[in-house]
Image (cartoon, rainbow, N blue to C red):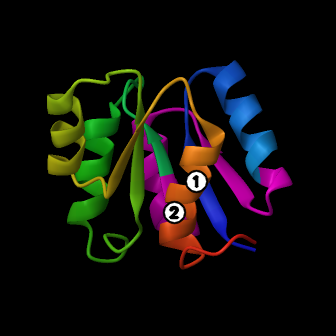
Amino acid sequence: MPKILLVEDNELNRDMLSRRLVKYGYEIAIAVNGEESVRLAQELRPDLILMDMSLPVMDGWQAASQIKSDPDVRHIPIIALTAHAMGEDRQKALNAGCDEYDTKPIDLTRLLDKIRLFVNNGEAL
């Protein structure tokens, strides 16, 4: 079962998304701030990280950059999740080391397609 690290500080968003992803066959680990996401990425070595960019303690931009600068975990794909939907926000996420970008509110079908590209070689579970 592929493991996803969901990094989201909003409890409602976290609960809704984690329950839906479990239903689609993913194991979910949760971090509520950027600092915790860096630590859990190193400890758990998930198959994918879904990273909210507006986080307390350390924002998602910094967390993604730290994860991608660590040779032990830099291979883990990161999908940025953000309400910032401008073109420069997408580029900022990619520059921070994110491999993909998706906007909030979450379109589950679109997000699942992106997850599958990284985790399941494009195939549904």
Marks 2 and 1, how far apart at CA: 6 Å
Asked if residue 55 lies left or right of residue 74, the reply is right
Asked if residue 89 lies left or right of residue 37, the reply is left
Nearest the viewer among 16 and 117 is 117
**As shown in the figure, which amino acid type bears the numbered disc 1?**
Leu
Which disc is residue 5 wearing? 1
Q: Residue at x 47, y 33 (%)?
A: 33
Q: Are marks 2 and 1 in contact (CB under 8 Å)?
A: yes
- Residue 85, visible in the rendered structure: yes
How many dots with numbers? 2
- Residue identifier under label 2: 48
Q: Quadrant of residue 30?
A: top right
Q: Is residue 38 magenta?
A: yes
Question: Disc 1 on helix, strand or loop?
Answer: strand
Determine whether 54 is above or below 6 in the image: above
Q: Position of residue 71 (x, y in %)?
A: 26, 76
Viewport quadrant of the N terminus: bottom right
Viewport quadrant of the C terminus: bottom right
